[in-house]
Each structure stands twice: as C-alpha cells, then as structure tokens.
Amino acid sequence: MKVKIKLIPTPDGKTAPLPQYQSEFSAGADLCACIDRPLTVNPHERALIPSGFAIEMESPGYGAFVFARSGLSSKKGVCLANGVGVVDSDYRGEIKIAIVNTSQQPYTVQPFERIAQLVFIPVETAQFIESDNLSETKRAGGGFGSTGK
C-alpha cells in the first residue's frame, strides 16, 4: 500500500524521520516525537505529542491505527491515553500521539524519540440494521468474565 506523507516541521524547522519498520516482518512502523526540546510527563499526567506528519492512504478501505510501543509501556509505564488511536482514511491533519504516564516516576520524552507505532489495517463500514431479535448463542448475554472459570 502506498501512503503519501506531508512533513510538518517543529517550530525551529526540524522534521521527524519518516515512520520506519524496525524489521522485515514488523507490523507497525515506529513514530517519533516531533518536538524541539525534551518534554517531561509527570506521573498520571497526559500529553499530546506531534508526530510531524500527515498522511494520505491510497485506499479508503484501510485505517491507520496508533499503538503503544510495547517496551515503552511495559518498562516505563508510558502508554497511549486513548488505548489505540484511530486515523480515518479521509483525515489529512497531523497525526498526534496522546500519551499517559502510568508510572510513579516522571518520564522525559526526548526530541525524535520513538514513542508509538502505526499499523495499517483493512476496515469495513458496517450497515446497521435495527432488529427486535438477535440469534441465540451459547454465550447469549453473558458479559465480562462470563466465559472464564
């Protein structure tokens, strides 16, 4: 899939590197913090970090999804504030990364540090049909934890 990228520089004119896959079979391309100076995120605080680019996907049948970097979240407690960021195929603004520091220690994001990853996933638009009846299943209306022991 081809993706056009429009670079958006920091106020001092620097641009982030293009998203990069770190291995041949990586599902996600790393996104960097396009900031011109370090940014400290205190415990339980959120920050919205610019990526330094906007995209145009070749196919409207895809969405771009921003996921946390597993090492950053598991080792430092820095996760995405919204769980997963959704970038619709018709969005043309700068991709920004909402992070939250879930640890007990301040975390300083360095300029152009890899802070998230971008994954392209096929999506379909659902046609919602109102119905008074749904088919029966073994699970039925069982909710959270209903299939566990």
Image: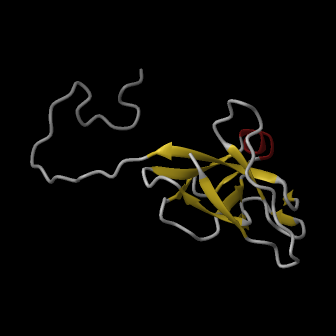
Q: At 71% from the left edge and 39% from the top edge, which residue is drawn? A: 70
Q: At 73% from the left edge and 44% from the top edge, which residue is drawn? A: 73
**x, y percent for residue 43:** 77, 59
Locate residue 126 relative to residue 86 in the image: left or right.
left
Total number of numbered labels?
Answer: 0
Q: At 62% from the left edge and 59% from the top edge, which residue is drawn? A: 4
In the depicted structure, whether residue 39 falls above or below residue 27: below
In the depicted structure, whether residue 27 falls above or below residue 89: above
**x, y percent for residue 131:** 12, 49
The answer to whether one can see residue 28 in this image is yes
Locate residue 143 relative to residue 120 in the image: left or right.
left
**x, y percent for residue 22:** 77, 38
In the current view of this chain or complex, which residue is farthest to the left?
A: 132
Locate residue 11 relative to residue 123 in the image: left or right.
right
Q: At 88% from the left edge and 70% from the top edge, which residue is drawn? A: 36
Locate residue 142 relative to residue 75 in the image: left or right.
left
In the current view of this chain or complex, which residue is farthest to the bottom?
A: 11
- Foreground residue, 85 or 120? 120
Q: Which image quarter is the C terminus in?
A: top left
- Foreground residue, 89 or 108? 89
Q: Which image quarter is the N terminus in?
A: top right
**x, y percent for residue 60:** 44, 55
The answer to whether one can see residue 104 in this image is no
- Foreground residue, 80 or 3? 3
Colour scheme in the image?
secondary structure
Q: Quadrant of residue 94?
A: bottom right
In the depicted structure, whether residue 89 falls above or below residue 20: below
